Image: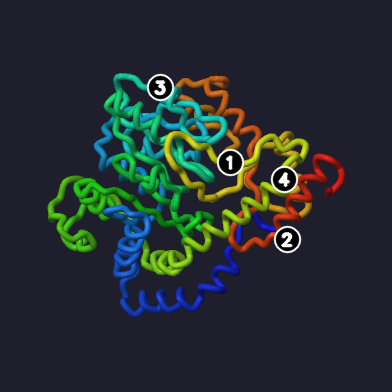
Amino acid sequence: MPFFSQAKTFEYLWPEIRSRVSDVIDDGKYSHGRQVALFETALARWTGARYAVGVNSGTDALVLLLRACGLKPGDEVVVPAFTFVASASAVVLAGGRPVFADIDPVGYGLDPWSAAHAVTPRTRMLMPVHLFHQMADMSGLLDVARRHGLTVVEDSAEAIGMRWGGVHAGLLGAGGVLSFFPTKTLGAIGDAGAVLTDDPELTERIAALRHHGRYGRTLAHFPGISNRTVDNGVNSKMDDIQAAVLLAKLTRLDQDIARRAELAAAYTQRLAGVPGVLRLPTVVRRDTATNPVFYVYLIEVEHRDELAGYLAEHGVGTETYYPVPLHLQTCFAGLGYRRGDFPHAEAACERTLALPFHPDLSTDDIDSVGGRIRRFFTGRPE
């Protein structure tokens, strides 16, 4: 059983995907064309954003958003120590300096108290990262940002469909990003990403930065935004083939999210009370309504690496999110952090394991994985 597959999804959607891909070929414009414009409009409508700007990856979306928000060389951005490396490397690529903070040990998001203590006179931005199935504590983090005069940039790459008080992830601060890497809740067949924002000036800057800083025709997707050049940009346009696939999959995103909730509930029921399973996904209810959207089903277990090896021997794929916390990564060694600086992040890196999880799974598949885990810890399937 692979960790991820979308074979059945593509079989179901193939007629619509084929039709949209044929439109791309007929148009003869394979990048930054009509399908991209249609997808940007549809994505904005689905999320409630005023603007959605398509780019070629979630990482590029984050780099361009940081640049568009005014990050300058040497400016600091507070980033959680437990997240994908791109959250912090994007800060470096945008010219800034990541400053790490610890996480909430239950929800895995950036901890407001730790974030506040990471702020220095050079800090300009705060980067919440919404991981796995729920958003970081945005009430607490927005309060930290207000007290210190910081811009909030959300790494919401995993968070499509998640909302805080009815507001979609990425829209509580200056802006946020989405990744459409194939494994994501809304996944393409390669790399693609987007920036979400309600700010027309920010949209204008990002729309130019993704296309070598060029304006004019590049802004045709955003009526009312003026044509002028402000900065040197990069080549980060979204491919129309990816936009065509995403448009087709967007039509069943609500259905896929509901299926993911069913599968998560089945895992939780199957794994409840299994010795050695230290924590199942918990929905943290704070001072406002939040909705979980399961991108990954993540558990904390004893003997994590041994369990992963055992499952692999029996044909069950898993993923480790993330084996080394960012403050201990070699590429950030020059920042001066040491083991023990962020204990919650370090514990999560040692104990968390993601199980096979995608809408193509059946409840029998969930039972099989759950039985294997129970057998590992008890020697018997039931």
Q: Which residue is mark 2?
A: 364
- 321 w.r.t. 340: above or below: below
Inspect the image, locate mark 2, and give the three-letter code of the amino acid beneath it: Asp
Q: Is residue 245 above or below residue 115?
A: below
User: Residues under labels 4 and 2: Cα distance?
Assistant: 14 Å
Spatial CA span between label 4 and label 1:
19 Å
Query: How many numbered discs sit on the rendered protein?
Result: 4
Is residue 271 in sight in this rendering? yes
Q: In the structure shown, which secondary structural element does the residue marked by tag 2 occupy?
A: helix
Q: Which mark is residue 271?
A: 4
Residue identified by numbered label 1? 321
Pick the residue in front: 372 or 134: 134
* Kind of element beneath mark 1: loop
* N-term-proximal mark, 4 vs 1: 4
Residue 19 picture quarter: bottom left
Mark 2 and mark 3 residues within 8 Å of each other at the beta carbon: no
* Residue 118 - label: 3
Q: Nearer the viewer, mark 4 or mark 1?
A: 4
**Which percent across, then down, holds residue 170?**
36, 45
Asked whether the beta carbons under mark 1 and mark 2 sit within 8 Å of each other, the answer is no
